[in-house]
């Protein structure tokens, strides 16, 4: 019976890992976030892994932002080229 209660209260490390990934995508309910934070408070390994997940997520967001800015610059250059071509034909 106690195992059953503990199982419902606390996440396994596998469940916590899945929730960490969902948390970075903002896909957790409030209760799920509380359970994840509780697990992280008790599990040193998952806490360390969670920090790494957050660092990787931040780095990926920077890369994505950088690529979007490059794409935006390329798009503006293409627009200017098209405008110039249109003006030259008129």
Image: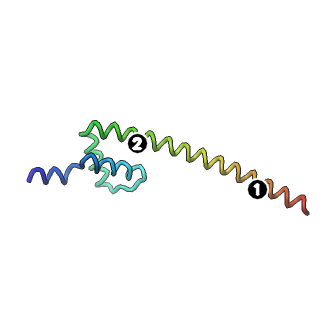
Where disc 1 sits, the SS reads: helix
Seen as rendered, the residue at the extreme left is 1
Q: In which quarter of the image is residue 87?
A: bottom right
Q: Residues within 10 Å of mark 1 (few under 14, many from 20)?
A: few
Q: Please state the horizontal and vertical placement of residue 82, each as a whole percent of the image.
A: 80, 58
Query: What residue appears at the point 79 percent right and 54 percent down from the top-left corner?
Result: 80
Q: Residues within 10 Å of mark 2 (few under 14, many from 20)?
A: some
Q: Please state the horizontal and vertical placement of residue 43, each as a whole percent of the image.
A: 25, 39
Among the two numbered marks 1 and 2 on one chain, the one whose residue lies closer to the N terminus: 2
Q: Is 56 positioned to the left or the right of 82 in the image?
A: left
Q: Please state the horizontal and vertical placement of residue 60, each as a whole percent of the image.
A: 50, 44
Asked if the residue at tag 2 contacts the one at tag 1, i.e. Cβ–Cβ closer than 8 Å, the answer is no
Query: What residue appears at the point 85 percent right and 58 percent down from the top-left corner?
Result: 85
Seen as rendered, the residue at the extreme bottom is 90
Q: Please state the horizontal and vertical placement of residue 73, each as a whole percent of the image.
A: 70, 48
Query: What residue appears at the point 16 percent right and 50 percent down from the top-left corner?
Result: 6
**From mark 1 to mark 2, how far is it between C-alphas?**
38 Å
Where disc 2 sits, the SS reads: helix
Which color scheme did the rendering employ for the protein?
rainbow
Q: Is 22 positioned to the left or the right of 4 in the image?
A: right
Seen in the picture, residue 56 relative to 19 is either above or below; the reply is above
What is the number of the mark on residue 53?
2
What is the number of the mark on residue 40?
none
| Number of disc labels | 2
The residue that disc 1 covers is 79
Q: In which quarter of the image is residue 45?
A: top left
Which image quadrant: the C terminus?
bottom right
Which image quadrant: the N terminus?
bottom left
Query: What residue appears at the point 46 percent right and 44 percent down from the top-left corner?
Result: 57
């Amino acid at each position: 019976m106690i195992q059953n209660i503990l199982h419902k209260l606390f996440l396994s490390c596998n469940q916590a890992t899945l929730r960490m990934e969902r948390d970075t995508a903002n896909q957790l309910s409030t209760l799920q976030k509380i359970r994840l934070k509780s697990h992280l408070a008790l599990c040193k390994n998952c806490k360390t892994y969670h920090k790494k997940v957050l660092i990787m997520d931040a780095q990926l967001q920077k890369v994505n932002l950088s690529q979007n800015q490059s794409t935006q610059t390329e798009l503006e250059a293409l627009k200017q080229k098209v405008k110039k071509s249109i003006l030259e034909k008129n």
